[in-house]
Image (cartoon, rainbow, N blue to C red):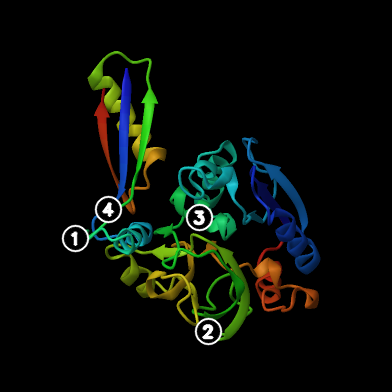
Amino acid sequence: MRAAVIVFPGSNCDRDMAVAFREVTGAETTMVWHGESGLPDNIDIVGIPGGFSFGDYLRCGAIAANSPICRAVVDYAKAGGAVLGVCNGFQVLTETGLLPGALMRNANLKFICKPVGLTVETADSIFTSGYEKGQRIEIPVAHHDGNYRATGDLLAQLEAEDRIAFRYAEDINGADDRIAGVLSANRRVLGLMPHPERAVDALHGGTDGTAMFKALAESLVSA
Amino acid sequence: MKARVMVMLRNGVLDPQGEAVRTALGNLGFEGVGGVRQGKVIELDLSETDPESARHSVTAMCEKLLANTVIESYQIEIL
């Protein structure tokens, strides 16, 4: 398996994501700077890490979403490529339009940084096949803008298409229907606010993120 | 030529920051503030001299970057 992790100015979870790919999946992992116009050849997945890309200026993820590398990521995803966006990476994915909805300031206006309970809402994806539907897991969150908005008919559509990947066990940020992560229509792009890469080693205080990376390793076989 | 873009959350989208400002105003003793919506103003210096072309290109900028039309609406003033 080969992975690429995108690095923007202000990314701060890029190394954690690369460690998770390397240690858990054994993937050969390349860091790719935002100014690059293309992704490495023969990759199986792109990771868009957490952080504060471009200082969260304008809107979280908005400037990163329009960087040269993101045009390549959009093309890659549209051709069926797998993309994992965590936290700021989720915000970037909504800003590119690869995932629907938008992420707003937390309803209580606080930066929330703590382990939270999540419910796995679908096991039907390359990211979640290592979990049971309905399984309760614990993964850390660290965000100020995780209040997911699914306007209009979007909520019903996500529900009908089984594209809600994770829900918070309890409301933490005001997100519609407690949504913590959503899948693209082809189920190959996942965006989520919680940080699975921060829960892959006993020293992290929990290992509930490991199953996601193991599932990816099983699903994505290098060409 | 200058353009001014006003970006606001769409009606119906809860604005937690506006709500916090409204509460703070109430705490300061300002009565009768029924609601506060907070947005942003972006001023652009353009080399364009034709107002219609300017509006056209600023609209494209809004759609592509300046506003997230999922949750925000925008108004353009050509100055």
Foreground disc of the pair 1, 3: 1
Same chain shared by disc 3 and disc 2: yes
- Report the side of B52 relative to A166 (left or right): left
- In this figure, which residue is indicated by the disc labeled 2? A133
Considering the numbered disc 3 on the image, is that residue within a helix, a strand or a loop? helix
Give the mark, 4 or 1, whose residue is nearer the N terminus.
Answer: 4
Considering the numbered disc 4 on the image, is that residue within a helix, a strand or a loop? loop
Query: Label 4 neighbourhood size at 10 Å, few (<14), some (14-19), many (20+)?
Result: some
Q: Give the residue type that dot 3 points to.
A: Gln
Q: Quadrant of the C terminus of chain A?
A: bottom right
Q: Where residue B21 sits in the image (x, y, percent)?
A: 35, 57
Q: Give the residue type that dot 1 points to.
A: Gly
Q: CA distance from mark 3 to mark 4?
A: 19 Å
Please tell me which residue lies in front, A152 or A175: A175
Q: Give the residue type that dot 4 points to.
A: Arg
Of all chains, the one bearing label 3 is A
Give the mark, 3 or 2, whose residue is nearer the N terminus.
Answer: 3
Q: CA distance from mark 1 to mark 3?
A: 36 Å
- In this figure, which residue is indicated by the disc labeled 3? A91
- In this figure, which residue is indicated by the disc labeled 4? B10
Tag 3 and tag 4, C-beta contact below 8 Å: no
